[in-house]
Image: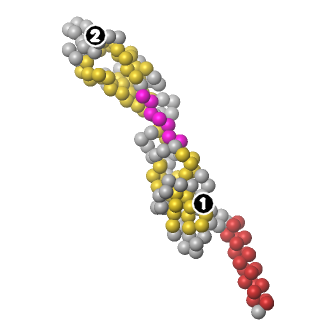
Amino acid sequence: MKNLLLVIIQIAIVCNVSAKSNGGCTPLVFIGGPTTFCAGDSVELTASEGASYLWTTGEVSQSIIVDNTGSYRVLVTDSNGCAGTSDPVVINVNENPQPLVSSNGPTSVCAGGNVNLTAIGAGPFVWNTMQIDSLITVSLPGDYWVTSADTNGCIGTVSYTHLRA
């Protein structure tokens, strides 16, 4: 009986050492895209196989969609009751630029007149008139908007008040 107990203890110790040496109950998180992206985009995080999941967001599915800056972990419990928490996955979401538009005068265009519209903020700027500049001169009534991109590749668009005749 003494030898049987010794064998069971040795097997348990070997199994625990073995489990720890190959990662054991420490779950992995598979990242379905870049961890830094622009507002409006997202990335899917998927935990390694388990019986139950609890993310730092409170979600309980194997995969979650993340669209906010933060550090994300998941607690995974396997069918044997072994539980472990993943290493953190840090997500960075860059805000989209918000260019401002100003005019050199009233927002009405008289026959033969014009209005200068100036985009302010991160450039380059592309107007709906297909002009690529921070300043455009318009002589026709209508709607005008400008799009800008920042160094992160994030894009923002702002509309300008409808110009009247």
Which quadrant, please, contains the C terminus? Answer: top left
**Residue at position x 49%, y 57% in the image:** 58
Q: Spot the residue most to the front.
A: 58
Helix or strand or loop: what does disc 1 sit on?
Answer: strand
x and y percentages locating residue 134 in the rendered image: 41, 18
Asked whether the viewer can see residue 37, the reply is yes
Q: Which residues are magenta?
A: 92-98
Foreground mark, 1 or 2, reads 1
Q: Spot the residue most to the top.
A: 112
Examine the rendered structure and indicate whether residue 73 appears above or below residue 70: below
Q: Which residue is mark 2?
A: 114
Examine the rendered structure and indicate whether residue 92 appears above or below residue 100: below
**Residue at position x 72%, y 70% in the image:** 17
Magenta-span inclusion, residue 142 = no
Examine the rendered structure and indicate whether residue 90 appears above or below residue 137: below
Q: Which residue is mark 1?
A: 85
x and y percentages locating residue 163 in the rendered image: 25, 18
**Mark earlier in primary sequence (1, 2):** 1
Tell me how many marks there are: 2
Colour mode of the rendering: secondary structure
**Residue at position x 54%, y 46% in the image:** 70
Q: Amino acid at mark 1?
A: Thr
**Residue at position x 38%, y 27% in the image:** 147
Helix or strand or loop: what does disc 2 sit on?
Answer: loop
x and y percentages locating residue 142 in the rendered image: 24, 21
Left or right: 134 in relation to 110 = right
Asked whether the viewer can see residue 45, the reply is no
- Nearest to the observer: residue 7 or residue 149: 7
